[in-house]
Amino acid sequence: MVRGKINRTNKALADWADVLTEIDEVSAELEESGWETLVLHPGDVSTTDAAAAADSGFRLLVPDSELEALESTVSGADTEFDQFEVYRARDTNVRIFVVVVKSEKTMEAVLYPVFYDADTDSSFVETLRTESEIRTTVSDLGNSRHCSFRHPEPDLFLPQ
């Protein structure tokens, strides 16, 4: 499985710069519409299927500074990130998406890339088909702190 993860990551790297540019463009559009945005730049993206964990979904490792900014963004008493959008950024070597989670009350949005390889992550694809909800869990390298977002429509991450 480690080899599959390395291959998935290597495949994603071919499109990574373009995906980050797309995230910046979506972020700029939101900011022009009055939203405050936080863009995450994960150093690692992985998946967890329903058989392996109750909180199946995407796992992102981000720098401490970004996790601190995220914790600050989501910790407000009025903050409820209850909306999410998925943009299909690439569907070539791997399936890459730009995810936007929003708090309408505070006009804040968090953007980040996720990806998976349908061949390597076949059990994750099955999770997307069968579960009513998945999560994105964002953590630091030591996994000592984390934040997560719910995605009640996992089928948005499936091939069209």
Image (cartoon, rainbow, N blue to C red):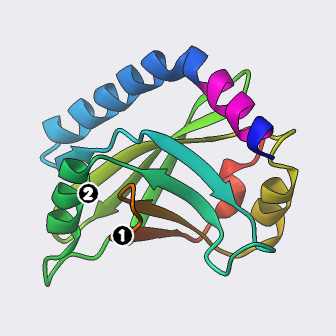
The type of residue carrying mark 2 is Leu
List x then y, in percent, for residue 109: 27, 54
Alpha carbon separation for disc pair 1 and 2: 8 Å
Query: Can you say whether 7 is above or below 52 in the image?
Result: above
What main secondary structure does the magenta stretch of the protein show? helix
The magenta span reads 4-12
Query: Can you say whether 68 is above or below 54 in the image?
Result: above
Residue drawn at x 58%, y 57% is: 58
Asked if the residue under mark 2 is in contact with the one under mark 1, i.e. CB atoms within 8 Å, the reply is yes
SS at circle 1: strand
Query: Can you say whether 32 is above or below 63 in the image?
Result: above
List x then y, in percent, for residue 102: 32, 60
Count every numbered label the image shows and give the total: 2
* Residue 50 visible within the image: yes
Instruction: Name the residue that disc number 2 marks.
Output: 67
Residue drawn at x 67%, y 81% is: 54
List x then y, in percent, for residue 131: 75, 73
Residue 48 numbered tag: none
* Residue 67 image-quadrant placement: bottom left
Instruction: Name the residue that disc number 1 marks.
Output: 147
